Image (spheres, grey):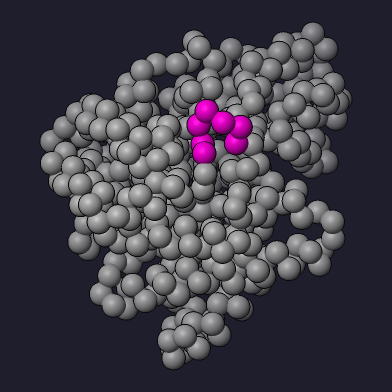
Amino acid sequence: MQLADHSHLTYCTNIHPGESWSAHFEQLKQYIPAVKQEVSPDKPFGIGLRLSNTASLELSKEEALSEFKAWLETQECYVFTMNGFPYGGFHHTVVKDHVHTPDWTTSDRVLYTIRLFRLLAALLPEGMEGGISTAPLSYKLWHVRCESEQAAVMETTTLHILQVVEQLVRIHRNGGPSMHLDIEPEPDGMMENTQEFLDWYLHYLLPLGIPFLEDKFGISAEEAATAIRNHVQLCYDVCHFALVYESAENVLQQLKQHGLKVGKLQISAALKAAMPEDAATREAVVDAFREFNEPTYLHQVIARKDDGLLHYPDLPQALEDAGNPAVKEWRSHFHVPVFVGTFGVLSSTRSDIEQVLQLQRKQPFTQHLEVETYTWGVLPAELKLPMDRSVSRELGWVLQQLELPAR
């Protein structure tokens, strides 16, 4: 939905199963009208669309796309953002690190992303900008053998991303909408914090991209740099940055310093807890984390020590090291409902969401806001509600934090 500050708020449909377009469309028809009725009954409702590769191929067929556009018009809905991170199956299968497959070293990722942008260009309302969030190049733990291998991965993935940028520039120069690819850092991605995003942007994307666009379009270096900044932006997933203990003020200040933009704010919360020195009390905390140890998604844990951070690739590895006396706090990558602050002896990083939404309210830094709690299906039973009620409650909570009505 469009808000009074001209931004748009939605939720990501990656919470709905269905890897084929027909299956996913059935989910949208079941849940979108109910959510809209609850949070935006008299105004158009924006959708944050997630399409698997298979679904994107099927929706690219003229008949399917025309049917979807007609449904959007009938329901008074519109699509302004997409989630292009998960390529394949995302429900009822083991996802784990395969969420990065295929990564940006492959042509499959390029073709999939360009296809999504063509669909988005066909769906966007006139005059509205669009964005698609995507993986942070690759999974870092696949490339740990040597620095030269990591550098080669950074260069290859950047050149592939520039193929997408070329298409976005062409679309816009030919009268199409302005659209941006929003890179989403996450723990153990090739980019997992602000500094790594900046290092990539300043030392790979701009140096490789400026001459690339100069050659493709016959434009100046300054024009090429502006095009890159417009078409490649940050997807600020609040959960992910909270996991690496970064404040919203720090993230936004560093981006502003380098003239970079936030294309999408993904509103999500992680689990956290202090790790007490007392053995019995600590065991109660560890037992609570065990309740969230499920086999579908990666639940990276980043522990805080007095001398820095300790990374565990998944919750089982953290549980094995639960007695580590140097560890003072755990934060785990488990997207819990944003409107819940505590989970027994555990709590969430909801305060990070509150802080970033305060900054957005005072001085908007992005036009796209998307709630992304995709773990409803694997949450403990006592946290589950009917899907439409859960989504509506999350969106309502965000609106309260923003203190902004729908337009």
Q: Is residue 115 above or below residue 325?
A: below
| In front of the other: 312 or 280 | 312
Please provide percent x and percent y for residue 353. 48, 37
Count up the numbered dots: 0
142 sits to left or right of 59? right
Q: Can you see residue 229?
A: no
323 sits to left or right of 393? right
The majority secondary structure of the magenta stretch comes to: loop
| Residue under the image location 40 percent in, 40 percent down | 20
Q: Is residue 208 above or below residue 370?
A: below
Is residue 308 within the magenta segment?
no
Q: Is residue 81 above or below residue 157?
A: above
| Residue under the image location 49 percent in, 10 percent down | 382
Please provide percent x and percent y for residue 56. 39, 51
Q: Which residues are magenta?
A: 89-95
Q: Is residue 358 above or below residue 341?
A: below
